[in-house]
Image (tube, rainbow, N blue to C red):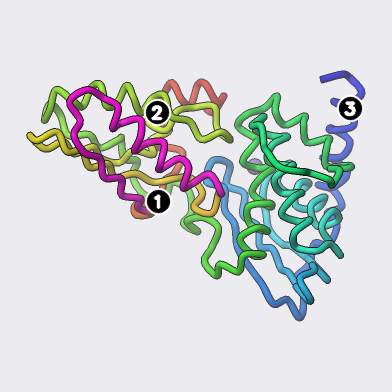
Amino acid sequence: MTLDVRELYREAILDHNRKPRNFRKLEGANRTVEGYNPLCGDKITVYLRIENDRVSDIGFEGSGCAISIASASMMTESVKGRVLSDVQTLFEKFHTLLTGEISTGPQPIDLGKLAVFAGVREFPIRVKCATLPWHTLRAAVESRPESVTTEFGPASQPALAPAVSPATSDLQRPIIEALRTVYDPEIPVNLYDLGLIYDIGVEPSGAVTIRMTLTAPTCPIADALLWQVDKTVRAVPGVTDVTVNLVWDPPWNRTMMSESAKIQLGLP
Ligand code: ZN
């Protein structure tokens, strides 16, 4: 990243954090969704008024780090007045910008000012902060009434280590190693060390049952991640069948991460 882009990024974050645009409860909203980023503690509520497949108005409220607030603020400016299909395209482009995933399909809309968020890529722990408003918006557009994530406060309960019962099977070690190759593209730590795998059950027949959670349920990659866990574990020699159960209780929080994951993400 050039110095100029870095400076633009810094200025945009400071400006929008200090004076968030459209920071208000929207009277007459016909969609309201709350989002929560347990990695950082950011909480926002997005209010949308959708008329004729267009975002006729948008507002947000919440509390969080400067990046989450600035991202929400800039998002509201970018999507107000747009048709929903363009909002979807913007979401995908923004997500691609931050995660570096290659997205396919035509993308005729320019990110405009949102391009400064390329700066977040230098701070991987902050990617979820920047994408939280967008995941929340997307959930609102798709009219899912539930919260974008768990809604539970962080670390309100005792930490759970990944609950793998000791020595029940020779297969567990290779399964764990396999799970360590699976990543949420928004977080540079594998699912196992993040603490997202709650339980690995192995039957004598080689049938495996995995109980796991995710940090944010509405991410469009959630299905892809579950599929990848299934496929990865299925490829472990000796595994005959795989069942992946996605659970939200207990809700994940950052104390469930391994020490090495915390170090990798620069957390205390
Ligand atoms: Zn944050």
Three-letter code for the amino acid on which mark 1 is drawn = Pro
Task: Say which element carries label 1.
Answer: loop
Quadrant of the picture in which ligand 1 is shown? top right
Q: CA distance from mark 2 to mark 1?
A: 16 Å
Q: Is residue 109 left or right of residue 167?
A: right
Most extreme residue toward the bottom is 28
Disc number placed over residue 251 in the picture, else none: 1
Q: Is residue 156 above or below residue 188?
A: below
Task: Say which element carries label 3.
Answer: helix
Q: Earlier in the sequence, mark 3 or mark 2?
A: 3
Near mark 1 (Cα within 10 A), the count class, few <14, some 14-19 or many ≥20, is many
Near mark 3 (Cα within 10 A), the count class, few <14, some 14-19 or many ≥20, is few
Based on the picture, tell me whether residue 222 belongs to the magenta stretch: yes
Q: Which residue is mark 3?
A: 7
* Residue 78 locus on image (x, y percent): 84, 53
Q: Which residue is mark 2?
A: 193
Q: Is residue 118 left or right of residue 237?
A: right
Query: Which region of the structure is painted magenta?
Result: 220-247
Looking at the figure, which quarter contains the N terminus?
Answer: top right
What residue is drawn where x is 67% and y is 29%? 100
Figure quadrant of residue 179: top left
